[in-house]
């Protein structure tokens, strides 16, 4: 990817797309260094990696009055743990995405008179920060059972895991329900194998799943979904990654 100017970054909280209310999004990830210097370290400090951590910080323009707005979404998530997906260049299928499960640690609002009402907030990780891809874009309504476009993630070595985040952003219809799952296979996924299944969702919200560390030789993955209800309609985003 060539150098670029941040113009279309996306931020998905558990069940809300906060991109339109965000003007700054920052990701950080670090591994704690633990000193192991000894008499055979040849006079140099020696360290090994300890605990890892990641953080998402964001800020933007305050809005309220609907579950999709930043104030409503932030208050409902404060102190809770859920999935977060950040995309630095957009959210089309195959776009770069960073994924984690984190706790909404703080939320701040307000400024001086005459200023555009701002907000700031921080998410602190409970799972690793995973570099992956978007498997389903947020702006495409789904009304019937179907499958998404395969994305090439690569094989999952033993000890690594598949991570998948589902953000259900809007729901319409009578008794609507969607059950999403992650499938893998060849480039066309002609004979799919189900790798993870989310719980049925009937309202906006988020879920995140990860594999058990078993090696997987398949290199392509997609999201598939089963929709039921009367005139149902769902807007959702899905991100996938391996770590």
Image (cartoon, grey):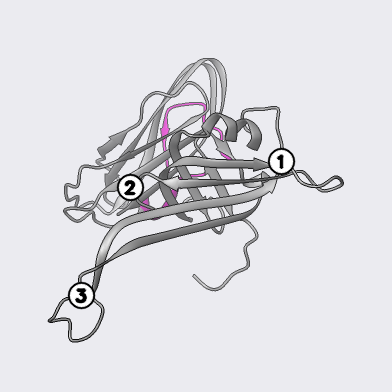
- Location of the C terminus by quadrant is bottom left
Per the rendered image, the range of residues in magenta is 130-151
What whole-number distance in Å separates the C-alpha atoms at marks 2 and 1? 37 Å
Alpha carbon separation for disc pair 1 and 3: 49 Å
- The residue positioned 55% from the left and 29% from the top of the image is 76
* Left or right side of 109 for 12: left
| Residue 8 x/y as whole percent | 62, 56
Specify whether residue 143 is painted magenta.
yes
**x, y percent for residue 182:** 33, 39
Asked whether the beta carbons under mark 2 and mark 1 sit within 8 Å of each other, the answer is no
Which SS class for mark 3? loop
Q: Residue furthest left?
A: 40
Decide if residue 149 is in sight here: no
* Number of numbered markers: 3
For residue 171, above or below residue 148: above
Estimate the x, y position of residue 171 in percent, counting from the top left. 55, 25
Task: State the residue at coordinates (87%, 47%).
Answer: 114
**Residue 2 magenta-drawn?**
no
Whether residues under marks 3 and 2 lie with C-beta atoms below 8 angstroms apart, the answer is no
The residue that appears at 18% across and 86% down in the rendered structure is: 42
- Counting from the top left corner in percent of width and height, residue 68 is at 62, 32
Please name the residue that numbered disc 1 is placed on. 62
Q: Which residue is mark 2?
A: 221
Is label 3 or label 2 in front?
Answer: 3
User: Mark 3 vs mark 2: which is more N-terminal?
Assistant: 3
Does dot 1 land on a helix, a strand or a loop?
loop
* Residue behind mark 3: 37
**For this view, does 90 lie left or right of residue 33?**
right
Farthest residue, direction front: 39
């Amino acid at each position: 990817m060539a150098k670029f100017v941040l113009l279309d970054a996306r931020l998905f909280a558990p069940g809300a797309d906060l991109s339109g209310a965000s003007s700054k999004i920052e990701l950080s990830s670090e591994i704690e260094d633990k000193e192991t210097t000894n008499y055979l370290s040849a006079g140099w400090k020696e360290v090994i990696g300890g605990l890892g951590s990641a953080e998402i910080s964001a800020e933007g323009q305050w809005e309220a009055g609907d579950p999709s707005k930043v104030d409503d979404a932030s208050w409902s998530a404060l102190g809770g743990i859920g999935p977060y997906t950040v995309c630095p260049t957009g959210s089309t299928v195959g776009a770069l995405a960073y994924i984690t499960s984190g706790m909404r640690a703080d939320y701040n609002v307000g400024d001086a008179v005459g200023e555009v009402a701002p907000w700031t907030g921080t998410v602190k990780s409970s799972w690793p920060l995973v570099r992956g891809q978007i498997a389903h874009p947020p702006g495409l309504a789904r009304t019937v059972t179907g499958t998404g476009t395969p994305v090439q993630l690569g094989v999952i070595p033993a000890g690594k895991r598949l991570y998948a985040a589902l953000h259900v952003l809007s729901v319409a219809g009578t008794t609507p329900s969607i059950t999403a799952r992650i499938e893998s296979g060849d480039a066309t996924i002609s004979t799919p194998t189900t790798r993870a299944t989310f719980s049925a969702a009937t309202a906006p919200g988020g879920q995140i799943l990860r594999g058990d560390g078993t090696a997987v030789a398949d290199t392509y993955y997609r999201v598939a979904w089963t929709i039921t209800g009367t005139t149902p309609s769902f807007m959702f985003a899905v991100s996938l990654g391996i770590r």
